[in-house]
């Protein structure tokens, strides 16, 4: 290389260096909350190790242009974990930050200079609720669009190589990692719904009409009712908000100062409206509260926007984080109405395992306030109505009706889920999960099971082997056949059952059915108890099963559900009942007491009425599950014995009534109560009277007297009362050593008072096989639930009839329950 060339090269390098030094580094971007995607205003963004930086605006955007840049940029804000990202010096670039909430609690700073201005502002908010809470308007109606999405998060790099996942590896092509410092997440489920919502103040009524619904991967139309505006609706103007069955205290509750600390941080214009920024945080740990901030309009003291998330140590299961964002607008320059809402739930996963996030975004438009609404809109007992054509809307409809268009990623979810459903591996996994939950394995048109009754044991039959099955929906979606055969190694007898159910209509339900059964049964146990031949019932009995009955009976019925939650069932039954083991049904058949019979021949008709106002169900292929009602559930059953019909021996009338409900009493938890009464007219052997429901297993049964034995007490008229209060950790949350366990306390009491007429005692050959209630029977206890999130232990005390044989004054019963 010549000297001239060397000199030229040196000059070129020198000039390049000068250019690099002189060139600016320009960085623009946005800072948002990692969970909700909401902007983080007034966050600090600066080049690491320098004082050069910027503050984000109200929408979270920032811009920095400087000649003195470092190789990385840091974003920080109070209450969030700082994030540092690398940049390229001397270039224009976009860097977006996602900030996660810090787990570290900030130290309190107490300033005493008169009354806290934040409390004054809170008081104004509360005083003006009547003007700003939409529930206080005469009427309103609007259209609402809901979109719900679930995403897998924290996906490890080698996850898609696992054997169980390989058949679905193609779905990882949809992993979204477009944001600079976000972890990849995989959208796997999306739903949309469009509905009209109506409300009137007098008489108070609310109705939602879901006119369109689209669900990826699901064909169950009953799910649609839970995708609208009424489900999981967080109303901040209410004092308590129901979220996953827990009563959270609203930050603007009338009793907010008991649970929250408040701080007045700032004031500024938001769309030409002067607003105050109010920050709130919990006063104590583990209470069902929020931390966050809201913007309050300065003259109406209405909430303009609120951004909040549950307290990080709140006593709720399976939820790592939950955030709520609501935006309100002033309609007609007078009424404040919600126009946009975002609910994001980060469901907790095992340590270093995959989790998932659920996002529900809602928008509102065509808002009309205090306009007349025709009465017929509110007809019917159902508060949510799904139109028949709701799930049949074409893509063209959705393209026009959506309040906001789908992103390319969201469009791919529908295609992805439809593809997954066609894979053999997916169908195999569904079969395994179905087997575990229902106990049945499907083979085309037939389902075999349940597996937990294949083998069991009792003292009468010995080892019991049972094989059963039923038809599947592939056979018919209206006709269901079922049956089983069983054999006992000790009594060497074959038992069997067969029946059918045919749906005349499905909406609302109307069905007929029949069942014939010849088997050994445990009478006197609750509907909630394990099946007689469930393997768990065999393993966890307190006493040998020596009080069984050989039954042979036929039942036919007609069932009609008039509206959701209101139904009648008319039944005709005929059967024979023969005592086994230590039981004795012997009774006199004549007044001279010379003829004795130990077998009951019974024919009866019955009618059952059940009313659960606005009860909701989720339909499945093999039945449906009730999600309960917000109102008391009432049941009435009347039975008439038909003497002489099919040689029946008895004429009697029997009436039973029950009412039960679960009442929320925030912040002290919730209370379940049940009141039941019954009376039998006529002279009959004691099995046809009211045999009070006992429990001889170590499993807790909420429908039974858990310290009472089977057939211990019998009445021909009675009244019983059961109450259990769940404190949901109200006391244990205040004990430092107990907080981390998140145990929840409860107390319970159950009592029954009854009597038996002398005629019903005189008919019996041996009236000493049971006890009449000469005085009330009581049992009470306390319990701990949420042990390891699924275990409940009840510590029970029997408080009366302590001298009866084979009874205990104290007992421990366990159960499993899955709840938030």
Image: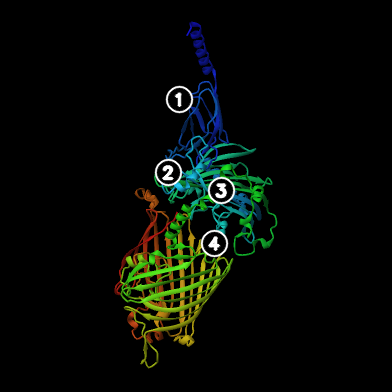
Give the secondary structure at mark 1: loop
Distance from the alpha carbon under mark 1 to that under mark 4: 59 Å
Depth-wise, is mark 1 or mark 4 nearer the camera? Answer: 4
Quarter holding residue 672: bottom left
Q: In this rendering, is residue 316 above or below 113? A: below
Q: Do the residues labelled 3 and 4 touch (CB within 8 Å)?
A: no
Question: Marks 2 and 4: in contact by CB < 8 Å?
Answer: no
Earlier residue among tags 1 and 3 = 1
Q: Mark 1 points at which residue?
A: 49
Going from N to C along the chain, the mark reached first, 1 or 4, is: 1
Secondary structure category for the residue under label 2 = helix
Which comes sooner in the sequence, label 2 or label 1? 1
Q: Give the vertical position of 610 relative to 400 (above or below).
A: below
Q: Mark 3 points at which residue?
A: 415
- Name the residue beneath numbered marker 4: 616
Whichever of labels 3 and 4 marks the residue nearer the N terminus, that label is: 3
Describe residue 252's horizontal placement relative to residue 788 as left or right: right
Q: Position of residue 604 (x, y in %)?
A: 48, 81
Residue 758 visible in the current orientation: yes
Q: Distance between the residues labelled 2 and 3?
A: 22 Å
Disc 3: CA contacts within 10 A as few (<14), some (14-19) or many (>=20): few
Q: Residue at x 64, y 38 (%)?
A: 271
């Amino acid at each position: 290389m010549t000297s001239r060339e060397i000199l030229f090269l040196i000059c070129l390098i020198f000039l390049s260096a000068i250019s690099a030094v002189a060139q600016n580094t320009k960085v623009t971007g946005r800072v948002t909350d990692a969970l909700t995607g909401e902007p983080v205003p007034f966050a600090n963004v600066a080049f690491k190790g320098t004082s050069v930086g910027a503050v984000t605006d109200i929408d979270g955007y920032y811009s920095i242009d400087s000649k003195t840049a470092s190789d990385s940029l840091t974003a920080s804000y109070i209450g969030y974990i700082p994030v540092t990202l690398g940049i390229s010096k001397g270039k224009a670039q976009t860097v977006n930050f996602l900030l996660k909430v810090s787990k570290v609690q900030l130290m309190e700073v107490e300033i005493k200079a008169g009354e806290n201005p934040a409390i004054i502002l809170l008081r104004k908010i509360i005083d003006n609720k009547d003007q700003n809470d939409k529930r206080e308007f005469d009427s309103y109606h609007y259209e609402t669009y809901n979109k719900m999405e679930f995403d897998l998060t924290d996906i490890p790099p080698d996850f898609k190589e696992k054997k169980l996942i390989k058949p679905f590896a193609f779905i990882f092509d949809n992993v979204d990692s477009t944001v600079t410092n976000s972890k990849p997440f995989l959208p796997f489920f999306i739903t949309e719904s469009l509905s009209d919502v109506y409300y009137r103040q007098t008489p108070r009524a609310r109705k939602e009409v879901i006119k369109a619904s689209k669900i990826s991967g699901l064909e169950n139309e009953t799910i649609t009712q839970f995708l609208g505006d009424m489900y999981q609706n967080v109303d901040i103007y209410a004092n308590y908000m129901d979220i996953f069955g827990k009563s959270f205290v609203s930050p603007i509750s009338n009793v907010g100062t008991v649970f929250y600390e408040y701080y007045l941080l700032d004031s500024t214009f938001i769309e030409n409206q002067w607003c105050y920024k109010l920050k709130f945080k919990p006063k104590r740990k583990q209470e069902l509260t929020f931390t966050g901030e809201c913007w309050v309009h300065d003259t109406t003291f209405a909430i303009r926007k609120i951004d909040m998330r549950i307290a990080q140590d709140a006593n709720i299961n399976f939820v790592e984080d939950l955030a709520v964002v609501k935006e309100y607008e002033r309609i007609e320059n007078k009424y404040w109405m919600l126009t946009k809402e975002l609910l994001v739930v980060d469901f907790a996963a095992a340590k270093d395992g995959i989790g998932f996030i659920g996002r529900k975004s809602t928008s509102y438009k065509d808002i009309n306030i205090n306009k007349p609404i025709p009465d017929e809109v509110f007809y019917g007992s159902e508060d949510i109505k799904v139109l028949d054509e709701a799930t049949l809307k074409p893509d063209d409809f959705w393209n026009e009706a959506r309040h906001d268009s789908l992103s390319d990623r969201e469009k791919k979810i529908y295609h992805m889920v439809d593809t997954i459903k066609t894979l053999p591996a997916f169908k195999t996994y569904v079969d395994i999960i179905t087997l575990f939950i229902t106990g049945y394995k499907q083979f085309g048109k037939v389902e075999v099971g349940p597996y937990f009754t294949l083998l069991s044991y009792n003292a009468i039959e010995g080892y019991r082997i049972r094989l059963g099955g039923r038809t599947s929906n592939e056979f018919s979606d209206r006709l269901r056949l079922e049956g089983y055969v069983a054999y006992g190694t000790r009594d060497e007898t074959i038992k069997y059952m067969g029946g059918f159910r045919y749906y005349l209509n499905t909406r609302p339900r109307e069905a007929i059915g029949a069942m014939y059964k010849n088997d050994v049964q445990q009478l006197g146990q609750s509907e909630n108890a394990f099946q007689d031949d469930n393997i768990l019932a065999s393993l966890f009995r307190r006493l040998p099963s020596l009080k069984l009955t050989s039954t042979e009976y036929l039942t036919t019925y007609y069932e009609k559900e008039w509206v959701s939650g209101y139904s009648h069932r008319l039944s005709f039954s005929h059967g024979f009942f023969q005592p086994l083991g230590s039981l004795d049904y012997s009774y006199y058949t004549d007044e001279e007491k010379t003829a004795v019979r130990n077998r009951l021949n019974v024919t009866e008709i019955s009618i059952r009425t059940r009313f659960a106002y606005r009860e909701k169900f989720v339909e499945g292929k093999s039945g449906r599950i009730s999600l309960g009602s917000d109102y008391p559930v009432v049941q009435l059953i009347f039975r008439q014995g038909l003497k002489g019909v099919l040689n029946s021996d008895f004429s009697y009338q029997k009436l039973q009534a029950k009412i039960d409900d679960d009442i929320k009493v925030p912040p002290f938890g919730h209370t379940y109560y049940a009141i039941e009464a019954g009376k039998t007219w006529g002279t009959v052997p004691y099995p046809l009277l009211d045999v009070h429901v006992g429990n001889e297993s170590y499993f807790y049964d909420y429908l039974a007297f858990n310290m009472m034995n089977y057939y211990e007490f019998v009445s021909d008229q009675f009244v019983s009362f059961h109450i259990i209060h769940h404190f949901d950790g109200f006391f244990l949350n205040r004990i430092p050593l107990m907080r981390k366990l998140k145990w929840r306390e409860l107390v319970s009491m159950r009592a029954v008072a009854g009597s038996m007429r002398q005629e019903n005692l005189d008919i019996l050959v041996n009236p000493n096989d049971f006890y009449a209630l000469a005085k009330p029977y009581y049992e009470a206890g306390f319990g701990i639930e949420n042990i390891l999130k699924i275990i409940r232990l009840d510590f029970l005390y029997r408080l009366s009839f302590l001298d009866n044989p084979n009874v205990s004054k104290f007992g421990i019963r366990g159960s499993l329950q899955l709840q938030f």
